[in-house]
Image: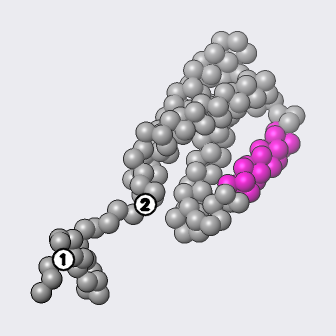
Amino acid sequence: MPSNDARILLQAAVPTAAAGAVAAVVSGVVAGGDGAVGAVVATLVVILFMGIGLYVLQRTAKSLPHLFQAMGLMLYAAQILLLFVFLSIFKNTTLFNPRAFAITLVVGTLVWIAAQTRAHMKAKILYVEPDSGTPSKGDKPEKTGPRSEG
């Protein structure tokens, strides 16, 4: 993963993990141990789903840029479907508090999106390849001075 991509992933994952830690403490105080476990599970789901999504989109942007927008839409639809599968598997669980899980999932997703947006805005990503300034072998040098008649 190129350094820009890793930096953006890190700048999105760290605030999400911090928000998840706060949510785990609050959920632990409000709902007990089940609430804390629900918040931790939700934080891990957000970081895993969104991190994989970011990785797939970055790979698509580099290898198949013409499919980037379609891949983004398909990826978000797939993430929602996978989340529904996850929720249906654990809908009657006693492992964690579902309310703490749901609230932390929404908060974690919003924090991830905000942090990723901020990281992209602050990143200095070139969208045009800069000219190297030296002509290649087949190029003829341009005449930039005044023409002399002779």
| Relative to 88, 144 lies left or right | left
Number of other residues with Cα within 10 Å of mark 2, as a class: few under 14, some 14 to 19, many 20 or more: few
User: What residue is at 76 percent from the left and 29 percent from the top?
Assistant: 102
Where does label 2 land, which residue? 128
Quadrant where the N terminus sits is: bottom left
Secondary structure, mark 2, is loop
Q: Nearer the viewer, residue 10 or 131?
A: 131
In magenta stretch: residue 61:
no
Secondary structure, mark 1, is loop
Q: Position of residue 139 (x, y in %)?
A: 28, 83
What amino acid type is highlighted by mark number 1? Arg
Q: Position of residue 90 (x, y in %)?
A: 82, 39
Quadrant where the C terminus sits is: bottom left
Number of other residues with Cα within 10 Å of mark 1, as a class: few under 14, some 14 to 19, many 20 or more: few
Foreground: disc 2 or disc 1: 1
User: What residue is at 87 percent from the left and 34 percent from the top?
Assistant: 92
In the rendered structure, find residue 1 and report the number of the disc placed on it: none
What amino acid type is highlighted by mark number 2? Val
Where does label 1 land, which residue? 147
The relative height of residue 98 versus residue 72 in the rendered view (above or below) is above
Q: Position of residue 86 (x, y in %)?
A: 78, 44
Q: Quadrant of residue 129?
A: bottom left
User: What residue is at 17 percent from the left and 71 percent from the top?
Assistant: 145
* Rendered image coloring scheme: one colour
User: What residue is at 63 percent from the left and 15 percent from the top?
Assistant: 26
Q: Nearer the viewer, residue 16 or 125?
A: 125
Q: Give the Cα separation between the discs numbered 2 and 1.
A: 32 Å
Magenta stretch, main secondary structure, is helix
Give, as a single range, the part of the protein colored magenta. 72-90
Q: Nearer the viewer, residue 129 or 65?
A: 129
